[in-house]
Amino acid sequence: MTSIILGIGVVLILIIIIMIFRVQSLISLVRGTPTTRETTTNKVNAAMWVVFLVLGTIGAVWSAIAAADYFLPDASSPHGRQTDDLFWITMGITGAVFFATHVLLFYFPWKYQFRENRKASFYPDNNRLEVIWTVVPAIVLTLLVLSGWKVWRDITSDPPEENGVVVEIVGKQFNWEVRYPGDKHAALGRKKPELGNFDFRLIDASNVVGIDLADENSFDDFMSREIHLPKGRPVILKIRARDVLHSVFMPHFRVKMDAVPGMPTKFWFIPDKTTKEMRETLNNPDFNYELACTEVCGRGHFSMRTLIIVEEEAEYNKWVASRKPWLAENRDYLAKVPANLQEKALRVIGPGDGGAAPENADDTTAAPANNAAALPAKGAVKMVANPELSAQ
Ligand SMILES: [Cu+2]
């Protein structure tokens, strides 16, 4: 309602201005041809440019100061600080040029307004001036682009797989599914945690990310509602989407990467401030890191917020150790594990709780029969095991 009244008000004011203008021109018609061409309108117009320059500058500075509370705090990752530095250098240079050119743009219409006794000088070209204003911006922009390219090259370099923490993030309407490689790699005969393969054809109501149980690395994989990250270690995000475009956005780390159906993407970074440290620095006990979706992906887009907890390595390891493998929580999927790997899978996830154990043992014996059904999925594994995809 208020906006309708405001709208009507604006229209009425416009009509009044037009009417005043019309009355003025009628009056001048009645008075006959003016002897001078230096009119009041011209002076008012010229003065308006300067007024707009001053008011506009005050408004811009005021809005920037008023919005400062909403700016992100200092980045919590080394590459984030590099990105910020780059941003502010670019902002400083382009901002200064913008300010200087706009002061001239608004000042000149006032300074060079029409005067009866002034004649414009004819000044067709000046080669030296043109060379200067072409070469200087060319050099400055080349330097900016090159420094940006260098930072971008560092950010998108190959992730340090050896000591990195791998986290798989799958976007779907409307939440993020998060999968971690478990810490039972020793039982699998591996030196470090490894994430199991996936195959989108295996997705169902429980297996929401399509965990491929024909790959033994997936036996100890676990899912999580929150993202836990250890401070100071490289984190490698393996990103994909199940349905439409989503986008992984972790603003405090300056992480942003699209999640694209059918095209896994990745991003790696080092979180170097724990949630606790950030709460102390910002003096805000409610502060939380978060993952949001920045691709308008449908009705529930707003609900794709996921908490991120950055903690010390020891706390992180304790959290990982407390997580139950997905397979241990979905024991009926043991039937999908190939017969020759069943024993290994049971070794990794341990016997079921209490009375459930014999039932699971039955599952194991029944597995060869069920396994036939899982065979087509095995064929699918070959496609997923394609080095390009597993490198993601
Ligand atoms: Cu989304």
Image (spheres, rainbow, N blue to C red):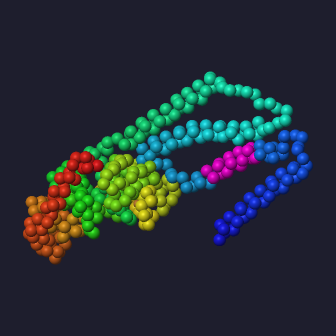
x, y percentage for residue 117?
A: 85, 32
For residue 357, side relative to residue 321 (left or right): left
Residue at image position (73%, 27%) is: 122
Q: Is residue 31 left or right of residue 79?
A: right
Judged from the image, the quadrant occupied by ligand 1 is: bottom left
Towards the viewer: 249 or 321 = 249
Look at the image and say whether residue 226 sits in the magenta stretch. no
Q: Position of residue 377 (x, y in %)?
A: 17, 60
In the rendered structure, which segment of residues is drawn in magenta? 47-64
Magenta stretch holds residue 52: yes
Is 350 positioned to the left or the right of 245 in the image? left
Query: x and y percent of residue 35 in the render?
Result: 89, 40
Res 297 quadrant in image: bottom left
Query: Which residue lies at the image location 16% right of the left edge and 76% below the top edge?
Result: 355
Closer to the camera, 347 or 27? 27
* Along the line of sight, the residue nearer the viewer: 375 or 362: 375
Task: Locate residue 61, reporting x and y percent.
Answer: 65, 48
Residue 215 showing in the rendered view: no
